[in-house]
Structures are given as C-alpha cells and as structure tokens.
Image (cartoon, helix red, strand yellow):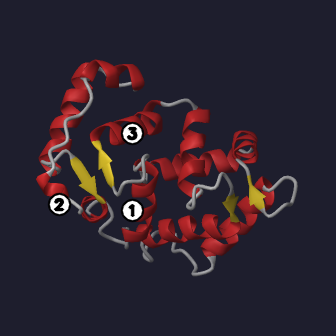
Amino acid sequence: MELELSMVRHQPEGLEQLQAQTAFTKKELQSLYRGFKNECPSGLVDEETFKIIYSQFFPQGDATTYAHFLFNAFDMDRNGSIRFEDFVIGLSVLLRGSVTEKLRWAFNLYDINKDGYVTKEEMLAIMTSIYDMMGRYTCPSVRDDAPVDHVERFFQKMDRNRDGVVTIDEFIETCQKDESIMASMQLFENVI
C-alpha cells in the first residue's frame, strides 16, 4: 500500500552531517531548508511538484521533459521522491563541485537508464528536452534539427573507441579536453 507523499513527514539528516557532505555552510543549509520546506511541507518532492516548480523558471518553453530527467538525476535512491538531502547534495556538486564532480553529475543526468553508458539516443533525448525548454523563440533562433546536429558532433568526439556508447571516462576526458564542450557546459549550468 502506497502512502500519499503529502501525508509523510520526512525529517532530514542532521545539519552537521549535511555540512560534511556538501560545500554549504550551516546558514546556507538552513536557508535552503526553509525554502525547500516552504515549497514542499512534507519534506519530499514528487516528480509532478518538481516539474511545476522547475517550469516556472522557463515560461518561454516546455520544461517538463527536462525536469523529468533532472528529477531522476536528483532522485538518488529511485523511489519517486527527492528528499532535502538528495537535493542539497546534488545542488552542492552543481554549484560548488570540482569540474570532475560536475561532469560525473552531468554523466548521470545523460545516462537515463542508469546502465553506466550514454547512448546517442539518451544524449539526443536530453539535448532535445533542453532545446524545448529554452523555447523556440530564443535568440539566435534554433533550427528544428539543431539538437540532432549538436548530438552528432558531441557523440563523435566522445565515443573514442567507436563502440556506440560513451563511458564515464570517455565523457569526462573528452569534456575536459574540449573548450567548446566546456563552454557549452557553462551555458547549460545556467539551466540547472
């Protein structure tokens, strides 16, 4: 029997423990927790709530698909809800992590089925969702085939051994060596 998420009250781990696991100060964690509890009084966020909150930041486009992928990247234990801990640990990596930590997080986002590899289809699904979210009316305007072109170029660079999948090592190595990929990662950092 599934409990209604709104009926369950989730108490986060101690602040000290979260402070040790993240790059946030105690004050920052308290402030993030207040905001989190304000939006999600139960202490848990389900996917629908996450999509609603996230979509507010991108009124010019359709953010639902990207929000779905983002939700799955934050939902570390795959139980259909994001705890404050999951959220704050992911946020810490994205905002204050090293380049390698950020790239590991990005790889996890692209690895939709969590099998340890990124396929061209997975990369295209994420890229298309980002283009959809940014809206059709971005400047400069985006061609319909832009996500496909983008993925073709990235995948060619990343799939070093031409086996049709990108491993985490290929992903990190290629990104770190390629200025245009690093620049576009900066661009997509603003999206998160």
In the depicted view, which residue is nearer to us: 178 or 140? 178
The x and y percentages for residue 64 are 37, 69
Q: For residue 153, what is the image quadrant?
A: bottom right
Residue type at the position of mark 3: Leu
Q: CA distance from mark 1 to mark 3?
A: 15 Å
Residue drawn 62% across the image and 64% down it: 123
Residue drawn 25% across the image and 27% down it: 28
Binning the other alpha carbons within 10 Å of mark 2 as few (below 14), some (14 to 19) or many (20 upward) gives few
Q: CA distance from mark 3 to mark 2?
A: 26 Å
In the depicted view, which residue is nearer to us: 12 or 155? 12
Q: Is residue 63 left or right of residue 162?
A: left
The x and y percentages for residue 94 are 46, 39
Q: CA distance from mark 2 to mark 1?
A: 22 Å
The x and y percentages for residue 141 are 51, 74
Q: Tags 3 and 2 in contact by the CB under 8 Å rule?
A: no
Above/below status of 66 relative to 82: below
Q: Tags 2 and 1 in contact by the CB under 8 Å rule?
A: no
Above/below status of 88 relative to 15: below
Residue type at the position of mark 2: Glu
Residue drawn 46% across the image and 35% down it: 93
Q: Which residue is mark 2?
A: 4
Q: Tags 1 and 3 in contact by the CB under 8 Å rule?
A: no
Q: Which residue is mark 3?
A: 91
Binning the other alpha carbons within 10 Å of mark 3 as few (below 14), some (14 to 19) or many (20 upward) gives some
In the depicted view, which residue is nearer to us: 56 or 2? 2
Q: Is residue 66 left or right of residue 163?
A: left
Q: Which residue is mark 1?
A: 67
Q: Earlier in the sequence, mark 1 or mark 3?
A: 1
Mark 3, mark 2: which one is toward the viewer?
Answer: 2
Q: Secondary structure at mark 3?
A: helix
